[in-house]
């Protein structure tokens, strides 16, 4: 059986829980206490040299790190990863966009805000906010005439980009300013369904700054 090395408040890990659920794939969960240093133990670093969750452990003992790589592995052969060469490349485009423009910007600001680390990172906050506004504007332009990021159906591109962007208000962005993005978020939320809660950092007593 697959093993998901997870940390519940991580939206990168949330992506994987969503896709596993949508696919109906059975798996075991191994919670990693990241604030207690468990992701930097020798055992975990063998799974992911970068020392981050999520990691997917395969039945044969191999492991895959990086959330979007895990998404593409799991989605192979399913409707969530198109087989058409162009549409598949468009999915990859958005997966790269997410890891460059969404997770390190909105994801970082959200993490700093919710764990009391905003002040210590104050020198980077203004730049991150400007980058976040550019990210949301790019999404607004892209979603003006399409239901989902790649065509008319949910793909792993939507799951990946939605994970942190739909929590942008946690760190001060106003999603009401982006009607196309807001409509897309409603559609993605409906397609995913209600079974995948977003866990606050406050559930982890070790998360505070």
Image: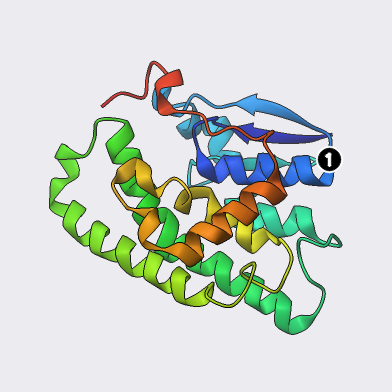
Q: Can you say whether 20 is above or below 32 in the image?
A: below
Asked which quadrant contains residue 112, the reply is top left
Residue 98 in picture, x, y percent from top left? 49, 62
- The mark total stands at 1
Please identify the residue farthest to the bottom as the structure is shown.
86
Q: Can you say whether 191 is above or below 120 in the image?
A: below
Residue highlighted by disc 1: 25
Q: Which coloring applies here?
A: rainbow
Can the viewer see residue 54 in this picture? no
Can the viewer see residue 51 in this picture? yes
Residue 36 in picture, x, y percent from top left? 41, 22
Can you say which quadrant of the picture contains the C terminus? top left
Residue 127 in picture, x, y percent from top left? 20, 61
Q: Residue at x 49, y 68 (%)?
A: 97
Q: Is residue 99 left or right of residue 118?
A: right
Can you say which quadrant of the picture contains the N terminus? top right
Q: Is residue 154 left or right of residue 12?
A: right
Please tell me which residue lies in front, 25 or 192.
192
Please identify the residue farthest to the top as the structure is shown.
205
Q: Is residue 102 left or right of residue 121?
A: right
Please tell me which residue lies in front, 163 or 178.
178
Q: Secondary structure at mark 1?
A: loop
Q: Can you say whether 44 is above or below 149 in the image?
A: above
Q: Can you say whether 185 is above or below 44 in the image?
A: below
Asked which quadrant contains residue 126, the reply is bottom left
Q: Residue at x 67, y 39 (%)?
A: 17
Q: Residue at x 45, y 63 (%)?
A: 179
Residue 149 in picture, x, y percent from top left? 61, 69
| Structural crowding at the residue carrying mark 1, measured as other residues with C-alpha within 10 Å and reported as few (<14), some (14–19) or many (≥20) | few
């Amino acid at each position: 059986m697959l093993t998901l090395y997870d940390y519940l408040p991580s939206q990168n890990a949330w992506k994987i829980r969503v896709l596993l659920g949508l696919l109906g794939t059975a798996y075991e969960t191994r919670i990693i206490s990241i604030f207690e240093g468990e992701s930097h133990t020798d055992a975990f670093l063998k799974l992911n040299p970068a020392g981050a969750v999520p990691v997917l452990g395969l039945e044969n003992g191999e492991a895959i790190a990086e959330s979007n790589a895990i998404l593409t592995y799991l989605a192979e052969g399913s409707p969530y990863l198109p087989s058409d060469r162009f549409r598949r490349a468009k999915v990859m485009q958005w997966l790269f966009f997410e890891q460059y423009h969404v997770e390190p910007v909105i994801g970082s600001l959200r993490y700093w805000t919710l764990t009391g680390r905003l002040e210590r990172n104050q020198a980077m906050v203004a730049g991150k906010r400007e980058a976040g506004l550019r990210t949301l504007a790019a999404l607004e332009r892209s979603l003006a005439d399409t239901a989902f990021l790649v065509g008319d159906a949910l793909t792993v591109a939507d799951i990946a980009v939605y994970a942190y962007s739909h929590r942008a208000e946690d760190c001060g962005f106003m999603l009401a300013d982006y009607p196309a993005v807001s409509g897309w978020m409603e559609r993605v939320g409906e397609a995913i369904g209600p079974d995948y809660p977003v866990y606050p950092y406050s559930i982890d007593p070790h998360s505070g700054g």
